Image (tube, grey):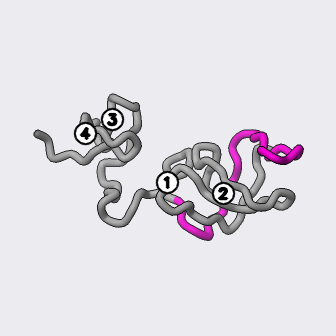
Amino acid sequence: MSDLPECPQCGLSNVYDDRDQRVCPDCGHEWPAGAASEDAGGAVVRDSNGNPLAAGDTVVVVKDLKVKGSSIPLKQGTVIRNIRLVEDDPEHIEGHSDKIKGLVLKTQFLRKA
């Protein structure tokens, strides 16, 4: 058996190296071969470009988003300052925009500012 880690997205062990990337053919997830493993302190939260995010960072929305419970959409280019990471969920962050408070956003629609 290989000594490669399991896929951080789907948890399957069908992973292979492709140059400096690790690839899971089951879900299509790719990540850097030198990335920190989940066993060493939790999953790493990354933006849509693969940059790691930390609590207190500023992010920018990359796509117009409809907001549940609000008639105001979140426009592309909206800045979300001082984000908070959602515990045990590397795909979501919490934050506030100028007009909408208490947002929970998927990291696939954000990029680090």
Residue hosting label 1: 90
Marks 3 and 1 sit apart, C-alpha to C-alpha, by: 18 Å
Amino acid under disc 1: Pro
Which residue occupies the foreground of this view, 91 or 31? Answer: 91
Q: Mark 2 or mark 1, which has the lower sequence index?
A: 2
Amino acid under disc 2: Val
Residue hosting label 4: 13
> Dot 4 lies on which element?
loop
Residue hosting label 2: 59
Image x and y of residue 102, in percent: 74, 60
The residue lying furthest to the front in this view is: 69
- Residue under the point 39% across and 62% down: 42
Image x and y of residue 34, in percent: 30, 54
Image x and y of residue 15, in percent: 26, 37
Q: Is residue 42 magenta?
A: no
Which residue occupies the foreground of this view, 29 or 62? Answer: 29
- Given contact means CB atoms under 8 Å apart, are the residues at marks 4 and 1 in contact? no
- Residue under the point 51% across and 62% down: 87
The residue lying furthest to the left in this view is: 1
Q: Quadrant of the N terminus?
A: top left
Amino acid under disc 3: Cys
Residue hosting label 3: 24
Q: Nearer the viewer, mark 2 or mark 1?
A: 1
Q: Which mark is residue 38?
A: none
Residue range highlighted in magenta: 53-74
Q: Mark 3 or mark 1, which has the lower sequence index?
A: 3
Image x and y of residue 19, in percent: 28, 39
Q: Residues within 10 Å of mark 1 (few under 14, many from 20)?
A: some
Marks 4 and 1 sit apart, C-alpha to C-alpha, by: 19 Å
> Dot 1 lies on which element?
loop
> Dot 3 lies on which element?
loop
Residue 112, by quadrant, is bottom right
